[in-house]
Amino acid sequence: MGGVSIIDENLPLVSVLMSCYNHDKFVGEAIESVLGQTFPDFEFIILDNGSTDGSTQLIKDYEKKDDRIRAIFHKKNVGIPRALNQLIDSAGGKFLARIDSDDVWMKEKLEKQLKIMEQDDNLIIWTEAELIDAESLSLDQKFTERYENLKRDGDIFDQLLAGNYIFCSSMMYKRENLEGIRYNEDIRNLNDHKFNLDLSYQYEYYFIPEVLSKYRLHGRNTIFSDMEGWYKDYMAIGKFIAREYGDRLSSRQNKKKLFHLIFTTPFYSAVKQDPWNKLNLIYGLKLPPYAIYTLIKLYFQNHNGQNEVYKSTSK
């Protein structure tokens, strides 16, 4: 494919988006990793989501030092999905790149992604990442080693049906390609999964195998602080997939992935994390029939859709 022009003199080329809540231990390093990029033409929008620690003051201090930073402050936490949607709606750049306030970028991250965009600016570009701990020490593991044998480039929608494996702090995509795509504010824990499903349904992905990001593992980024919400999110994701993307679920393999997504994945992950939690018993009984009901409903949805197509072509 020939090269494409990605320059618009009237806009910053990239909008970097960060939402922060009580990450005063990490947010400074995250901000520094953005400001130290070898590619300088970006705006940096930071939303402080009602922090009660020192994060707010840190962000204010950085905003005074660098005019590329534009900060938004909420007095109360509005939730991650709403915060991310506000960041997207506030962005003016041609491309968007999100970084969580506890993650880190390597200095050439934006530059190397933009070189790929010059070939095809409709790609969703993500990169390899190194895992680090709360003290920024390497855990000697790459992000994709946790998700081996999964397709990383091209049409990855079918693989994403089983669960999200894209590191969102490493992604870059064109802003105008988010038309109709936003984070679902009714889903708390699995928004990245739904977001990538929506993107992968329309666009191809491109994976850079070089470590250009760092993913921080620490005690406060576990989703199991809200186990019931975790279970309910998987039910909601399953329902959403069946309703919106039934045309991609005709194969037995994809139907099996949907069943595992609704029941097997959340149940076994929760049991492994907290085996004696009473919610595991409740949802262990509740999820299988819900998954079967969803698949039955999908069958009739697809069957009726095929009948409508047949009727319309027979007139």
Image: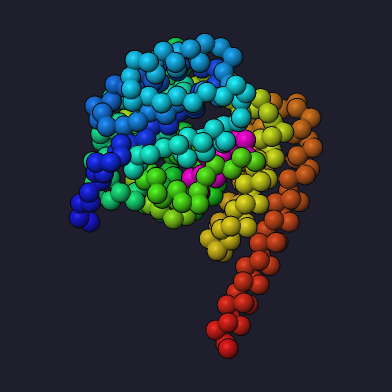
Can the viewer see residue 64 in this picture? yes
Q: Residue at x 75, y 39 (%)?
A: 283
- As drawn, the residue found furthest toward the bottom would be 315
Q: Position of residue 181 (x, y in %)?
A: 50, 48
Q: Position of residue 51 (x, y in %)?
A: 57, 18
Q: Is residue 81 magenta?
A: no
The residue depicted at 53 percent of the width and 60 percent of the height is: 248
In the rendered image, the vertical position of residue 234 relative to residue 277, given as above or below: below
Front in this rendered view, residue 48 or 233: 48
Location of residue 287 by image quarter: top right
Q: Horizontal placement of 302 versus 56: left or right? A: right
> Measured from the top left, where is residue 61 in percent x and y?
41, 13
Q: Residue at (72%, 33%) from the top-left corner?
A: 228
**Where 262 falls versus 141 (above or below)?**
below
Q: Is residue 256 left or right of residue 28?
A: right
Quarter of the image with the C terminus is: bottom right
Which of the two residues, 289 or 37, is positioned nearer the viewer here?
Answer: 37
Q: Examine the image and state in which quarter residue 7 appears.
A: top left
Rendering quarter of residue 309: bottom right
Q: Main secondary structure of the magenta part?
A: helix
Residue 259 visible, this angle? no
Judged from this view, the residue extending furthest toward the left is: 2
Front residue of 171/50: it is 50
Give the residues in magenta.
187-198
- Relative image position of residue 130 (x, y in whole percent): 38, 26
Q: Is residue 193 magenta?
A: yes
Apparent side of residue 111 relative to residue 223 in the rendered image (left or right): left
Residue that appears at 64% across and 27% down: 224
Looking at the picture, tell me which residue is in the foreground, 7 or 245.
7
Q: Tell me how many marks there are.
A: 0
Image quadrant containing the N terminus: bottom left
